[in-house]
């Protein structure tokens, strides 16, 4: 087991960072009573990191083959997460719900991808900015919406 850990330490670190940062964003979603919480965000981030690591491994193993482009996996992660995010957007009666959750899932996938490539600084700064938007900007937005006559509820979809 120690040999496995020493040989795969960088990969384990990348995956652990992805999970931890995804969970942080999920905590904020739980605090505001949203459907996609710690597990969902951690899994999106982890899954993205795994696909990026696979991209790198494929590139290393088969990079000498002509026409091989391991970055295609990364681009498909973005498409797949867009589909997952679209599934989190709900039309409930005449209210549209889940847009922030969908955006959070999408950026969490980016955090996982950054972690998967080993770009830890990028992943951590992005996580801090996501939490800034979800916590601080949310607090700043409420008085503006009240002043504008908006009740804070999602807009009516016609």
Image: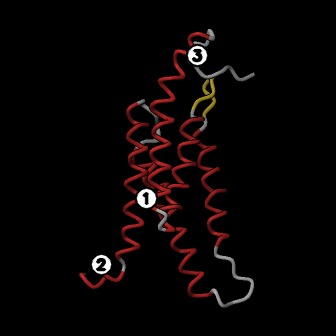
Relative to 78, does residue 11 appear above or below in the rendering? below
Above or below, 92 against 104 in this view is above
Q: Residue 61 sits in which quadrant?
A: bottom right
Q: Secondary structure at mark 3?
A: helix
Mark 2 closeness class: few <14, some 14–19, many ≥20 residues within 10 Å: few
Q: Position of residue 134 (x, y in %)?
A: 48, 34
Find disc 2 in the rendering and name its residue. 5
What is the x, y in percent for residue 57? 53, 80
Mark 3–mark 1 Cα distance, whole angstroms, equals: 34 Å
| Label 2 SS | helix
As displayed, is residue 138 above or below residue 59?
above
Mark 3 or 2: in front is 3
On the image, the x and y values in percent for residue 122 come to 50, 57
Q: Residue at x 48, y 56 (%)?
A: 123
Please state if 53 lies on the left or on the right of 5 as rendered: right
Circle 1 Cα neighbour tier, 10 Å, few/some/many (<14 / 14–19 / ≥20): many
Quadrant housing the N terminus: bottom left
Label 1–label 2 contact, CB within 8 A: no
Determine which residue is flagged by label 3: 145
Disc 1 secondary structure class: helix
Residue under numbered circle 1:
18
N-term mark: 1 or 2:
2
Seen at 66% across and 56% down, the residue is 79
Task: Determine which of the numbered discs, if any, sits on residue 59 in the image.
Answer: none
What whole-number distance in Å separates the C-alpha atoms at marks 1 and 2?
A: 18 Å
């Amino acid at each position: 087991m120690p040999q496995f850990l020493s040989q795969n330490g960088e990969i384990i670190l990348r995956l652990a960072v992805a999970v931890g940062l995804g969970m942080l964003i999920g905590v904020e979603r739980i605090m505001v009573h949203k459907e996609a919480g710690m597990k969902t965000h951690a899994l999106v981030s982890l899954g993205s990191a795994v696909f990026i690591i696979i991209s790198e491994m494929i590139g290393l193993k088969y990079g000498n083959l002509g026409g091989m482009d391991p970055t295609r996996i990364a681009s498909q992660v973005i498409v797949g997460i867009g589909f997952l995010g679209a599934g989190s957007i709900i039309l409930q009666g005449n209210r549209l719900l889940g847009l922030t959750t969908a955006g959070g899932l999408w950026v969490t996938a980016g955090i996982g991808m950054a972690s998967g490539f080993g770009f830890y600084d990028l992943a951590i700064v992005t996580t801090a900015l996501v939490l800034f938007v979800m916590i601080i900007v949310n607090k700043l937005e409420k008085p503006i919406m009240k002043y504008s006559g908006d009740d804070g509820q999602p807009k009516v979809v016609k």
